[in-house]
Image (cartoon, rainbow, N blue to C red):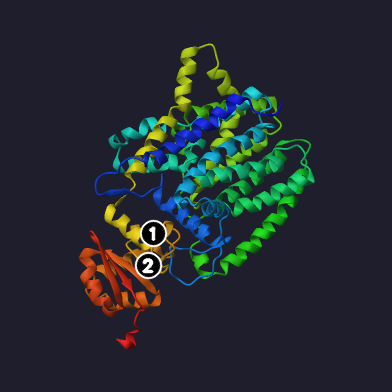
Amino acid sequence: MNRPPARFWLIPAAVAALRMLPVLSLRGTPPEGQSFIGVSYLPKDFLAYAAFIRQASEHGSLLLYNPFTTEPQAPRFVLLFHWLVGLGVRVTGVSAIDAFEWSRVPLVFLFFATLWWFLRPLLPDRKDRLAGALLVGFAGGIEGWLRPFASALPEAFAARMLWETSGLQGWSVFAGFYNPLWIAALILAMRILRPLLFSARSSPGALAAASATFVVLFCTHPYTAVGVLAILGTGSAAALLGRRPFDLRTPLVRGAALAPALLALAGLTFWQMQEPVYRASSGGVFGPQNMSVLWYPLTLGLLGALSVAGARRWLESQHPFRFEVLGWIAAIASLHWLPWVNGYKFVFLLPLPLCILAAPAARELLSGPRRGLALAAGIALFGGVVFQTIEGVVSTRDALLPSPARDLVSDLALRPAGNALLPPVLGNVLPAYAPHKVWMGHWFLTPDGAARKQAYVRMMKAPGAAPELRKLCLEQEVRYLAVLREHSARVAHALDRSIVERVEFGGLMLFVLGAPQKPEDR
């Protein structure tokens, strides 16, 4: 019998309910004079997701442009998940943010349905499979118990610990479920890894489906595709070297099956990179933001210890996929720790194989006759969920905009599409709510974002910056310009006859510009 027991579905139901509590907390009342930004978790990135979703809902096109720069560009972004959610917005009429946030619920159930299928060759015993699903749903480390005491640590160390052990890094599957995009990526990753890595022999149809799914994964979340390639390569190499007799045929067949997908993606990437704006705002795999394995005692806790015990069992019993799973762990540990790789992008791929290895040992421990030990183990394994949920609610309710800023965004959402020059925070927010491109917005998607931020501050404050501001508005065809009211007189003098409307929003001033005048016409 391959179907999961009825009680299995309580796991995704509980996971989805807990992960949606931060979203539901937004139904409360914000502090006076403030408005909720409207997204749970990591607003700067969730707003960027919403911007692409809103764009897809309006145009329906699979090819999307970058709304966080006003440079002329051809649409080259292919983001399948954002596009699908955008189509949902188009059909239902809900907001892009609500569609993205609530997509988490069906995705969680789809993830666990896929997980039960994925675990079948790895955990043949149904009780172990159920224990594995329970670990996947809720197990984590002990960092949540220690983070409240970070203030007692040296400031530099505390800051690093709080960032690197944050649930936003995805140190547990539950933590990673804050991001619907990651859930979708994990579902696709399992659909690829089982036929290509965890099947004794896959049919040609299964191999072809895995290859096509890899293309879908790359167009959904490229970093997961890179991680899956590393898992396939390291897992296959470990199996090749560890097994006797030496079998080269299996990895060659799997590599050949994946080759068409890699060739197709190489062609797509080459075409995309011919577009200057896409080229300037893509990339990011290489960089210094790695995550140290030295945090494992905190971020993995008892789950890490149980996975080590499980690995010893798998090696002693010669589990048929022992080398592949250990290769998976080695691949992701290397990716997230290498000093020249932005490893934080890959951490969320690590917990799943640990839960698989730990499942039999965890089942025995949690169901053993020593009730006190089982209770302590349960708290150590699953207690982090409480801290992560509370942190999610608090951080969501702390993501605020002054009400005048929200009113300005609402006003712009009703105006015809045009290029906008706004303070950095508002530049990150506006494309999620309105069809405008901003000269400066998201930290990653705005080319030369740090330099543009400095230029904006200079143009607002420097007495002699009026020519620079006029030139920028002319070259970038700026239609909407928002500034702090304390800078409004200087800006009004600089732009003068280009201004056709002025609207005040508390401490902000919105200038609506007509056709900018060329310098020789002034």
Kindly report the distance in space between the C-alpha atoms of the residues bearing marks 2 and 1. Answer: 9 Å
Point out residue 78 in the picture as x, y percentages from the top left corner. 57, 59
Q: Which residue is mark 2?
A: 420
Horizontal side of residue 264 vs 482, given as left or right = right
- Find numbered disc 1 in the image and state the secondary structure of the residue it sits on: helix
Vertical order, 499 against 18 (above or below)? below
Point out residue 337 in the picture as x, y percentages from the top left corner. 50, 45
- Residue furthest to the bottom in view is 520
Point out residue 116 in the picture as x, y percentages from the top left corner. 64, 32
Horizontal side of residue 437 vs 231, given as left or right = left
Q: Is residue 333 visible?
A: no
Horizontal side of residue 197 vs 69, given as left or right = right
* Residue drawn 51% across the image and 12% down it: 370
Quick one: 158 or 7, which is closer to the camera? 7
Q: Which residue is mark 1?
A: 430
Q: Residues within 10 Å of mark 2 (few under 14, many from 20)?
A: many
CB-based contact (under 8 Å), mark 2 and mark 1: yes
* Residue drawn 36% across the image and 63% down it: 412
